[in-house]
Amino acid sequence: MRRILARYFRFKQPVGHDHPRQDHADTATPTDADLFDPSEKSLVKFRKAIHDLLKKYAQEVRSTRRDIQSLFNKLSSEVSARLESHKIELQGTHNSSVKQLMAAKDSIDAINGQVTALRQYVADQQGELRRYQDGFNWVITKDFCNRIIGCIDDMAKMSVKEGISDAHKEDLSAAMQQLVYALDGCGVQQFSPPVDADHREHRSYAEIVATEPASDPEQAGTIARIVAPGYTLYISDNQSRIIRPAKVVVRDMVKKEKANE
């Protein structure tokens, strides 16, 4: 995670950019030790790093938009000047031939076509910038959350190892809970599909990691147990994105097929 943040903090100045490149050396990049530090200070440091990264990227987007708007204004001024020039020429040449008037009209039409094409280009570039920003934000958010989720999974595995004292288990459980609360505070919610439910109804967010024989043919294809919970990013009441599906064990469907035979 530290290398990813460091790479994006030192992104290159876009080609043709008139503004001086900002110095990102003062941005505090999280260390490897911070990735496994469950303290509130470390989480705040990660959140600040992500916030600073998005803020700097937003500044670059605004700067690019200003450059595009400046180019548009410059071309619009040139077009207006040329149109005014043609208008003066037409007013001062009453005896011009029809051919000259048609040539002037064609020139104006060509300029109008260029202006229309330029406006479309600016609109396309703004849409591309928005799509790139949305994708960039999602990649950073998903990668960061998966790092934290990985820490939670590792601590869950450690807590069930033999030889771990009860005090150590309580410490691990408390640290895991703090990380889950931290993710929930950022809009990332933990979920688990119901046990004994038909997996086909939950397959979009429940990943099968193992199967086991079904004691009853009617139970074939149902969820036997949850290996690890899933996590989803809440965006709005009608929109969310799966960061990681839940990992489940499903009762073997072959049992049901044999019973039907």
Image (spheres, rainbow, N blue to C red):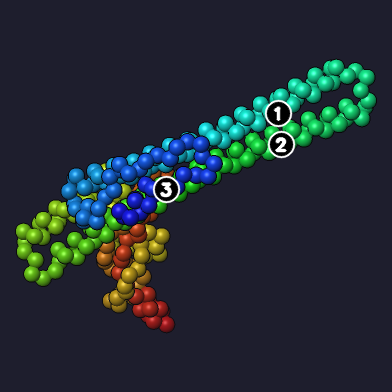
Give the residue displayed 46% in from the left and 44% down from the top.
Answer: 13
* Other-residue count near label 2 (Cα within 10 Å), few / some / many at <14 / 14–19 / ≥20: some
- Who is closer to the viewer here, 80 or 145? 80
Mark 3 residue element: loop
Task: Look at 50% across and 44% down and name the residue there.
Answer: 14
- Identify the element where label 1 is drawn: helix
Mark pair 1, 2: CA separation: 9 Å
Measured in 3D between alpha carbons, the distance from the residue under mark 3 to the one under mark 2, in whole angstroms, is 33 Å
Nearer the camera: disc 1 or disc 2: 1
Q: Residue at x 88, y 19 (%)?
A: 93
Q: Nearer the viewer, mark 3 or mark 2?
A: 3
Disc 1 + disc 2, Cβ < 8 Å: yes
Q: Amino acid at mark 3?
A: Phe
Q: Which residue is mark 2?
A: 114
Compared with residue 16, is residue 259 higher up or lower down, i.e. above or below? below
Q: Which residue is mark 3?
A: 11
**Amino acid type of the residue that numbered disc 2 sits on in the rendered structure:** Gln
Q: Position of residue 261 (x, y in %)?
A: 42, 82
Quadrant of the image containing the N terminus: bottom left
Pointer 1 residue: 79
Pointers 3 and 2 in contact (C-beta within 8 Å): no
- Of the numbered discs 3 and 1, the one sitting upstream in the chain is 3
In the image, taking residue 80 as reference, residue 233 lies left or right, namely left
Q: Position of residue 8 (x, y in %)?
A: 39, 49
The residue sitting at 16% across, 65% down in the picture is: 158
Q: Amino acid type of disc 1?
A: Val
Mark 2 element type: helix
Of mark 3 and mark 2, the one earlier in the sequence is 3
